[in-house]
Amino acid sequence: MSRIREAFANGKAFIPFVTCGDPDLETTAAVVRACAENGADLIELGIPFSDPTAEGPVIQGANLRALTGGVTTDKIFDLVRDLRRDVTVPMVFMTYANVVYSYGAERFISTCRQIGIDGLILPDLPYEEKDEFLPLCRQYGVDLISLIAPTSRNRIAMIAKEAEGFIYVVSSLGVTGTRSEIKTDLASIVEVIRGSTDVPCAIGFGISTPEQARKMASVADGAIVGSAIIKILEKHGADAAPYVGEYVKSMKDAVRG
């Protein structure tokens, strides 16, 4: 069983997202540890990219701050090596295909395996092109996480059948960011997924409140939150870890409902 599946083994999962290096790597390390200590079941680590097409203004700002601060892929690998001394929950990278290409796909994916990264989410990698990375991911035991969006429609079952780790269900069209309400008919998307695979699915994009998280977890196997956490980081900077920890705890309690 992949380690990512374990994140969903004890009930509904809460998955926080953090951009590495915003505002600096020391803060990222403290925030990731606070997430783990407060019940995060799996943690998504964003590797910043200069043109993050799936991101709204909040996470774009985090990318910019991290890159301006001199963050590199190698520094993020070192960060994970350090975190893995005491953080045991599954961790996945979320980044863009270009970041993996420019580093060298095999070098990147084999390093993920070596440092204890369990999966890879590439929002700009179309399902039809996943074979660029899938054989390497399988070779090194890193799950290539599939995304399913409201526009996937007749491809949902096809994508779900081949999915591994967990399925990232995109709650609404457009980019990441908090939303006051999520109107997509997610239940019917999840129903198709459940009919095609036993791989767990978690809903992300637009979730910020415990109520939203509870609702999404009632439909799927977990909830993913990014922008709301980045906003706490924006507000508190280097002192953000305890505030993020508190938020993660409230969200975790909500998804467990």
Image: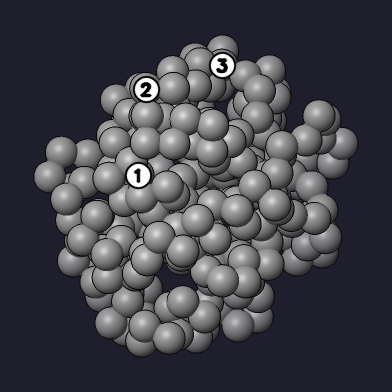
Q: Disc 2 marks which amino acid?
A: Pro
Instruction: Give the quarter of the image for residue 114.
Output: bottom left
Instruction: Give the quarter of the image for residue 7.
Output: top left
**Mark closer to the chain start, 1 or 2:** 1
Q: Is residue 89 left or right of residue 21?
A: left
Q: Disc 3 marks which amino acid?
A: Ala
Residue 253 vertical placement versus 26 (above, below): above
Residue 50 vertical placement versus 8 (above, below): below
Q: CA distance from mark 3 to mark 1?
A: 24 Å
Circle 2 residue: 242
x, y (%) of residue 183? 87, 36
In the image, what residue occupies the spot 65% across and 80% down? Answer: 128
Circles 2 and 3, Cβ within 8 Å, touching? The answer is: no
Q: Is residue 106 left or right of residue 85?
A: right
- Which of the pair 145/18 is nearer the observer? 18
Q: Secondary structure at mark 1?
A: helix
Circle 3 residue: 254
